[in-house]
């Protein structure tokens, strides 16, 4: 069977991560969480004291990074220069910083090259914001997964409940701000590709979304 590049874009909390992992497992494909790559750069920038609008500093930082994924018994882990930073990048502060850093052209260029190299051999599911519009405009199959802001906030709140002291209202406000930042940025704004399959997951189970996507992929 022909191996494909599959892109799944959409806003935070739409269910992209869970669905992308399941699709990759079902097809025996690699799964790439591109949001984690931006979070990784945001984490390293914060650690190094590089400002989110310091393009020279960000460019120099990117030139020293070696970001890659490994899979172990805990799942997919992000390594930065061989250090596991997976748990450190899942905080509200790093989420917001990642949204800001992702708008910087120097960061996007670095990750554009890295992501395309990861997809060179195909058989990959890429999850992100601009996978089908910018990184892989010729992807074999593109999806845009969305859900209402309220539903997405509830999902993210439940996900963070044991790791964060944020209220549901604070999570919803944060998601709204991230949506606005991602949609309005000048470089690679978040939007569906013209040829993407649009799926609203607000009232669908993970399995329903996965089966719907697999039906499109197999056609």
Image: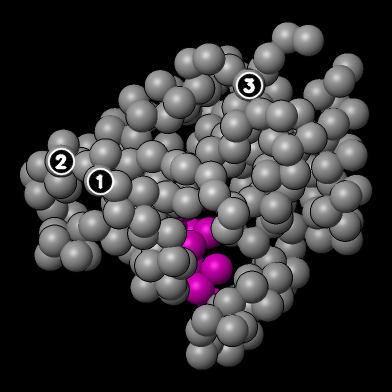
Is residue 93 rendered to the left or right of residue 150?
left
For the residues labelled 1 and 3, the Cα–Cα distance comes to 25 Å
**In the depicted structure, whether residue 152 falls above or below residue 4:** below
Helix, strand or loop under label 3: loop
- The disc label shown at residue 102, or none: none
Q: Which residue is mark 2?
A: 64
Crowding near pointer 3: few (<14 within 10 Å), some, many (20+)?
A: some
Element on which disc 2 rests: helix
Residue 76 position, x and y percent, is 54, 49
Q: Residues within 10 Å of mark 1 (few under 14, many from 20)?
A: few
Query: At x 42% / y 37%, what residue is drawn?
Result: 188
Task: Pinpoint residue 15: horizontal percent, then vertical percent.
Answer: 70, 55
Earlier-in-chain disc, 1 versus 3: 1
Q: Do residues under tags 2 and 1 come within 8 Å of each other at their CB atoms?
A: yes
Quarter of the image containing the C terminus? Answer: top right
Residue found 16% across the figure and 37% down from its top: 63
The residue that appears at 53% across and 38% down in the rendered structure is 32
- Give the labeled residue for mark 1: 81
Please state if 106 lies on the left or on the right of 91 as rendered. Answer: left
Viewer-side residue, 183 vs 196: 196
Colouring? one colour
From mark 2 to mark 1, how far is it between C-alphas? 8 Å
- Circle 2 Cα neighbour tier, 10 Å, few/some/many (<14 / 14–19 / ≥20): few
Q: CA distance from mark 3 to mark 2?
A: 28 Å
Q: Is residue 23 above or below residue 145?
A: above
Measured as percent of width and height from the top left, residue 65 is found at: 22, 42
Asked whether residue 179 is in view, the answer is yes
């Amino acid at each position: 069977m022909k191996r494909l590049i599959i892109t799944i874009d959409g806003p935070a909390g739409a269910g992209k991560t869970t669905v992308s992992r399941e699709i990759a497992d079902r097809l025996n494909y690699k799964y790439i969480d591109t949001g984690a790559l931006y979070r990784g750069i945001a984490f390293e920038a914060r650690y190094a004291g590089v400002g989110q609008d310091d393009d020279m500093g960000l460019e120099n930082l990117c030139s020293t990074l070696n970001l890659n994924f490994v899979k172990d018994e805990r799942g997919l882990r992000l390594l930065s220069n061989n250090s596991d930073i997976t748990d450190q990048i899942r905080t509200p502060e790093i989420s917001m910083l990642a949204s800001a850093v992702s708008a910087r052209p120097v960061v996007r260029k670095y990750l554009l090259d890295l992501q395309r190299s990861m997809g060179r051999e195909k058989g990959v599911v890429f999850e992100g914001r601009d996978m089908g519009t910018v990184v892989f405009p010729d992807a074999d199959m593109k999806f845009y997964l969305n859900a209402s802001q309220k539903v997405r906030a509830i999902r993210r709140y439940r996900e963070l409940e044991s790791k964060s002291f944020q209220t549901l209202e604070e999570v919803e406000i944060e998601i709204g701000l991230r949506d606005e930042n991602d949609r309005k940025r000048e470089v690679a704004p978040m939007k569906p590709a013209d040829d993407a399959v649009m799926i609203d997951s607000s009232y669908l189970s993970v399995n329903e979304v996965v089966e719907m996507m697999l039906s499109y992929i197999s056609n």
